[in-house]
């Protein structure tokens, strides 16, 4: 019986080790190419090694083991004490599992296997392996150093893990009765909209739980939040319509009324895009009477034709003046290189700082700034960001993920105009939509960006017009007072 058990463990070691090496190679390649790896892949890489080594140690503890000299420490001796082998198990768990997990708990806004991990997380995992393997290099079997090195860290690492879950990520506690609610609230509180979109189902799960408990009002609220994160949940939309016919009517995929057809093209075949009016940010801008969108560009790669196409859509769809500053703002130095494929990237703050240094904020004029750049931008933990808002209602839109501006000129113009229209509407206080047919719905990928509608609903457009009217009235009142 014992020999059968030991044989089973040794077979598991070989299988896990083989899979582990394959996964290690795969993770290394992905990390070099893209600068980040899926959290699930990194976890299973570590788990493969820990599982294989623990299985080997258990085999040594419970039965005889003829060493073959492969793997760290395996060829040392068969006469290692069981206490040392148990201590090694403790060190293996502490250094390779508990300590890296604790680091993730204290450095991440949300913890799940779906979250991508970049070089820092991989370095922490490698450091754990090095610390675990060190006794093999600096001591001999039976040395007290091994017992202390491997045995002592287990309790502190476990305590750090428990405190990290309790204080920072209580939704990870499996015995917490409120973990579903805490998970949903954590997702909705994320500043990283991309990460939130990847965890939309946590919000949906909490909404369903509230629904089953009879808390209809709260369930409706979380169902709507879940749709904002992923508007393509047909079952959620149907349930929302059943709970609240009025909301269901407003949010239904086919019932939303648009000022123009929601999926109609921006340009007909015979439409000619006229050049936008050119403007300069000087005292002449103080003579304008209406809120005006000013398009700026950061870097040399945003063409006049792209700017004109974006301005054409905004001006026609929103009936608002648009002009452009022809001189581009100098692109600041890149802030990181994310793998060989993605290459250079720019932190959003580096670009917005360059724009703010360029704009003369002493100008007294009702201006909204739309900044276009070909730079691939990221915002904190949010990577591959399409657009972001910052001070004074300014909007930054990146074309980096929209295609080749030479080979796919019209497609890039369409995607940029679509994103710019959505971002400008939001800068006027129009809320994000849960309707996938609205241009204001959230897109987690370029595919979803293409699938969503081209225009806002009539209700959203009415909110925009009222807010625009209010801004213009406030400006004209201020201008009239200042002239007296």
Image: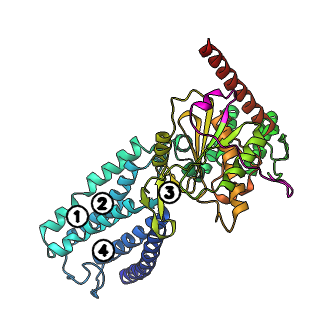
Q: Earlier in the sequence, mark 4 or mark 2?
A: 4
Q: Measure the alpha-carbon separation of dots 4 and 1.
A: 14 Å
Residue 126 showing in the rendered view: yes
Residue 222 showing in the rendered view: no
Residue at image mark 2: 94
- 309 shown above or below 401: above
Q: Quadrant of the N terminus?
A: bottom left
Q: Closer to us: mark 4 or mark 1?
A: 1
Crowding at dot 4, Cα within 10 Å, few <14 / some 14-19 / many 20+, comes out as many
Residue at image mark 4: 57
* Magenta-colored span: 267-292
Does residue 283 belong to the magenta stretch?
yes
Q: Measure the alpha-carbon separation of dots 2 and 3.
A: 22 Å
Residue at image mark 1: 150
Q: Earlier in the sequence, mark 3 or mark 4?
A: 4
Camera-nearest residue between 82 and 72:
72
Residue 115 is marked as: 3
Q: Measure the alpha-carbon separation of dots 4 and 2.
A: 15 Å
Where is residue 407 shown, x and y percent of the image? 68, 68
Residue at point 56% right, 34% down? 282
Q: Secondary structure at mark 2?
A: helix
């Amino acid at each position: 019986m014992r020999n059968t058990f030991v044989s089973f463990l040794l077979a598991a070691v070989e299988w896990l080790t083989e899979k582990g090496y394959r996964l290690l190679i795969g993770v290394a390649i992905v990390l070099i190419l893209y600068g980040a790896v899926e959290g699930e892949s990194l976890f299973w890489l570590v788990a493969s090694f820990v599982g294989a080594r623990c299985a080997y140690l258990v085999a040594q503890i419970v039965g005889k083991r003829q060493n073959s000299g492969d793997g760290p420490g395996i060829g040392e001796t068969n006469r290692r004490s069981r206490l040392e082998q148990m201590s090694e198990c403790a060190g293996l768990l502490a250094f390779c599992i508990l300590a890296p997990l604790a680091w993730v708990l204290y450095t991440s806004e949300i913890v799940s296997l779906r979250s991508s991990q970049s070089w820092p997380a991989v370095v922490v995992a490698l450091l754990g392996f090095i610390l675990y393997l060190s006794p093999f290099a600096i001591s001999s079997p039976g040395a007290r150093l091994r017992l202390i090195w491997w045995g002592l860290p287990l309790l502190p690492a476990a305590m750090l893990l428990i405190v990290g879950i309790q204080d920072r990520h209580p939704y990870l506690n499996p015995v917490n009765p409120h973990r579903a609610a805490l998970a949903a609230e954590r997702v909705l509180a994320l500043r990283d909209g991309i990460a939130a979109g990847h965890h939309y189902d946590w919000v949906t799960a909490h909404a369903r739980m509230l629904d089953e408990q009879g808390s209809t009002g709260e369930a409706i609220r979380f169902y709507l939040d879940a749709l904002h994160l992923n508007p393509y949940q047909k079952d959620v939309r149907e349930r929302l319509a059943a709970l609240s016919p009025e909301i269901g009517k407003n949010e239904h995929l086919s019932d939303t009324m648009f000022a123009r057809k929601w999926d109609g093209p921006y340009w007909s075949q015979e439409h000619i895009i006229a050049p936008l009016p050119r403007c300069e940010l000087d005292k002449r801008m103080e003579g304008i009477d209406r809120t005006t969108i000013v398009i700026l560009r950061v870097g040399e790669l945003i063409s006049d034709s792209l700017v004109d196409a974006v301005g054409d859509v905004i001006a026609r769809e929103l009936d608002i003046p648009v002009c452009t500053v022809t001189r581009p703002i100098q692109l600041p130095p890149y802030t990181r290189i994310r793998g060989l494929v993605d290459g250079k990237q720019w932190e959003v703050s580096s670009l917005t700082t360059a724009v703010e240094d360029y704009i003369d904020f002493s100008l007294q004029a009702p201006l909204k700034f739309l900044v276009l750049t070909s730079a691939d931008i990221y915002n904190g933990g949010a990577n591959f960001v399409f657009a972001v808002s910052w001070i004074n209602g300014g909007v930054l839109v990146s074309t980096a993920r929209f295609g080749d501006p030479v080979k796919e000129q019209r497609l890039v113009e369409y995607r940029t105009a679509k994103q710019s229209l959505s971002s400008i509407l939001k800068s006027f206080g129009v809320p994000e939509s849960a309707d996938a047919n609205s241009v204001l719905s959230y897109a987690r990928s370029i595919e979803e960006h293409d699938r969503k509608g081209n225009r806002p609903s009539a209700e959203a457009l009415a909110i925009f017009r009222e807010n625009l009217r209010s801004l213009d009235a406030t400006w004209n009142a201020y201008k009239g007072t200042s002239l007296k």
